Amino acid sequence: MKIKYTVCCTILLFLCSMRETVGLLTHGNPVNVTDTIHGFPGHNINLADVMQLLLNQTAEIENMKQQSTNDRSITQSLQDRVFFLEAELKNISQRFNDAVQVLDDLKLKDMSSTQLLLNQSVELEQQSAKDRYSIHLLQNETQRLVRNLDDLKVQVRYTSLSLLDVHSMTEKLNGSLVQRLEERISDVHDHITNVSKRIGFTATVSSLSATWSSGTLVYDVVITNVGNGYNPSTGVFTAPTAGEYVFFVNVQSYSTQSIYVDVVLNGVTKVRTMAYSYGSKDYYDAGPNLVVLSLQKGDRVWVKHYSGKGYWNDGSLTTFSGFLL
């Protein structure tokens, strides 16, 4: 606007100068453009200068117009730039607001995270306290177990010594037991041997006889016959093995009769016994006797008649026995 005002003032001054010039020409004063023009008192105006001034002013005006056009273009560019900057400012403002919102959200999240971390820190501290307590309990338990282990070691040591003592005693007892067992086995073996060597018999007659008066008295009913040395069919005992034998004989007289019998070894009389009656009132007398004989294997012993007759048997009274010592 200042430029436009300056241009207008310059044009008005120029028009006034032209009017004065035209008035002079109208009053019959020829004008030469190369002449000096007298204007205000004391001033001489050169037309060429005026024209040059006018051209200069016109050029200046053109320049000013061009400058104005350029200024308008620049102004428009500046306005566009201002609009762009305003839009960019709005965008920046929106982005700033968004950034502030994001920052606020981040602050909230950070506060939440901080609170969560604080809670987790409290929980970790509580867990750490529990762990410390558990560690303390474990340490106490470990110490107790170590003490128990030491006690067990001592007990194991004593037990080992005791086991050694027991082992030693066991060996001694085993030796003693083995010895005793061997002795017992030997005794049992001897006993079995002795049992196997045991020989003995007892026999009686199956019936009485009032007339028997000769030969061998056959004791035909066997009560015992260990070693099977006695033969009830013949009445003869045959020694299964050598040794000392005991023989016992008893003969019971028939009624008031008398009877004499001998114990014979291989046909040789060794001892004699009798059941002697003294009269009509002397009934059923007994005639026992016993003898110990040394026999060889195969020797034969029996009872034979010597004198008198008959024998009685009521409940195995007349018997013949013998056994190996």
Image (cartoon, helix red, strand yellow):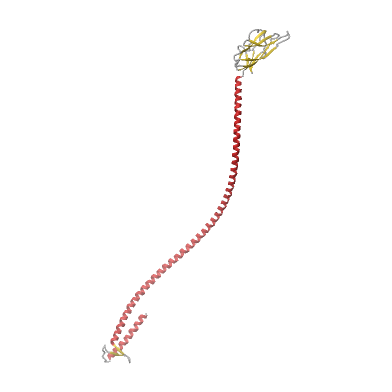
| Viewer-closest of 246 and 114 | 246
Counting from the top left corner in percent of width and height, residue 164 is at 59, 37
Write the residue at 39% across / 70% down.
85
| Viewer-closest of 17 and 310 | 310
The number of numbered badges drawn on the structure is 0
> In the figure, is residue 316 to the left or right of 114?
right
Write the residue at 31% across / 87% down.
17
Quadrant of the snapshot with the N terminus: bottom left
> Can you tell which quarter of the image residue 312 is in?
top right
Write the residue at 60% across / 31% down.
175
Quadrant of the snapshot with the C terminus: top right
| Viewer-closest of 96 and 236 | 236
Write the residue at 35% across / 82% down.
6
Counting from the top left corner in percent of width and height, residue 91 is at 41, 67
Above-or-below relation of 3 to 294 = below
Counting from the top left corner in percent of width and height, residue 223 is at 63, 16
Counting from the top left corner in percent of width and height, residue 294 is at 63, 15
> Can you tell which quarter of the image residue 311 is in?
top right
> In the figure, is residue 276 to the left or right of 69?
right
